[in-house]
Image (spheres, grey):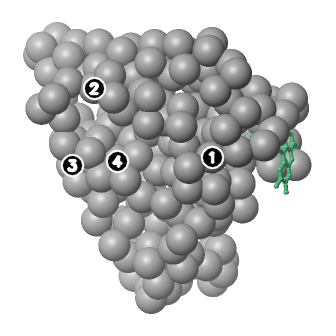
Amino acid sequence: MRVLAVFGSPRKNGNSARMLEAALQTLPESAEIRRVYVAEKNIAPCCATRDCQTLGYCPVEDDMQQLYRDLDWAEVILFATSSQFGDVSAPLKAFMERTWPLRGTLKNKIGGYVVAGRRYVESSINTLHAFMLRHNMILGGRGAIGYGYHEGDIENDPLAFEDARKMAKRVVEVYRLLCSGRMERPVAGG
Ligand SMILES: Cc1cc2nc3c(=O)[nH]c(=O)nc-3n(C[C@H](O)[C@H](O)[C@H](O)COP(=O)(O)O)c2cc1C
């Protein structure tokens, strides 16, 4: 199982990152995991020239080019984000926008997510669902929500970790179902 873990918060060891790490710990030992901290990357927002429609790829030369390869490699994509102004973090939103040229290629990859916020997180969830549906990904269970403000506050929300682990377990269940042949297996680039 090839898992791309996309961390959206600028805090590398923040609340959402801790939740996603807990989820990753529950994956089978055989899982290959690549971690990406999008806030550390140079990812410009989509410039909307539509050049990708004629070229068939995004010509913007920044860190997204490696991330396109990571997305292609992954069978499972797990997101972590802080809720910022009710939505996903700005670096994660830029990353999402830049996947526009990939329409079709993320089909049947399994998605999951965790969100950390002080209180208001609904639009973050909508954005994550919209991203996965737009790409015809398979939403592997409901995501996990954790409540906290300062870095580390999440340690006082045991349900956040419990739900994060449940999310990962459900993703594994869905992955195994797909691999069982009862449904078509997700194929990189397919
Ligand atoms: C710019 C900014 C905007 C924020 N807006 C919200 C918000 O709309 N709703 C919310 O619940 N928390 C909001 N927060 C608080 C963070 O979501 C909260 O501190 C969270 O635990 C951070 O997760 P992290 O440690 O993974 O970064 C905001 C934080 C920042 C920095």
Q: Is residue 184 visible?
A: no
For label 3, the SS is: loop
In the displayed structure image, the side of residue 179 where residue 143 appears, left or right: right
Q: Amino acid at mark 3?
A: Ala
State the residue in front, 166 or 140: 166
For label 2, the SS is: loop
The numbered disc on residue 188 is 3
**Mark 1 vs mark 2: which is more N-terminal?**
1
Tell me the distance, in whole angstroms, between the alpha carbons under discs 3 and 1: 30 Å
Tell me the distance, in whole angstroms, between the alpha carbons under discs 2 and 3: 20 Å
Q: Which residue is mark 1?
A: 14
Q: Is mark 1 within 8 Å of ligand 1?
A: yes
Tell me the distance, in whole angstroms, between the alpha carbons under discs 4 and 3: 12 Å
Q: Amino acid at mark 4?
A: Leu
**Mark 2 vs mark 4: which is more N-terminal?**
4
Which mark lies nearer to you, 2 or 3?
2
Q: Is mark 2 within 8 Å of ligand 1?
A: no
**Mark 4 vs mark 3: which is more N-terminal?**
4
**Residue 117 placed where, x, y %?**
77, 36
**Residue 119 placed where, x, y %?**
86, 29
Answer whether labels 1 and 2 touch (C-beta < 8 Å).
no
Answer whether labels 2 and 4 touch (C-beta < 8 Å).
no
**Mark 3 vs mark 1: which is more N-terminal?**
1
Q: Which residue is mark 2?
A: 27
> Residue at (84%, 34%) from the top-left corner?
118
| Number of marks drawn | 4
Q: Amino acid at mark 2?
A: Leu
Q: Which residue is mark 4?
A: 4
The quadrant holding residue 171 is: top left
Answer whether labels 1 and 4 touch (C-beta < 8 Å).
no
**Residue 166 placed where, x, y %?**
45, 13
> Residue at (53%, 37%) from the top-left corner?
18
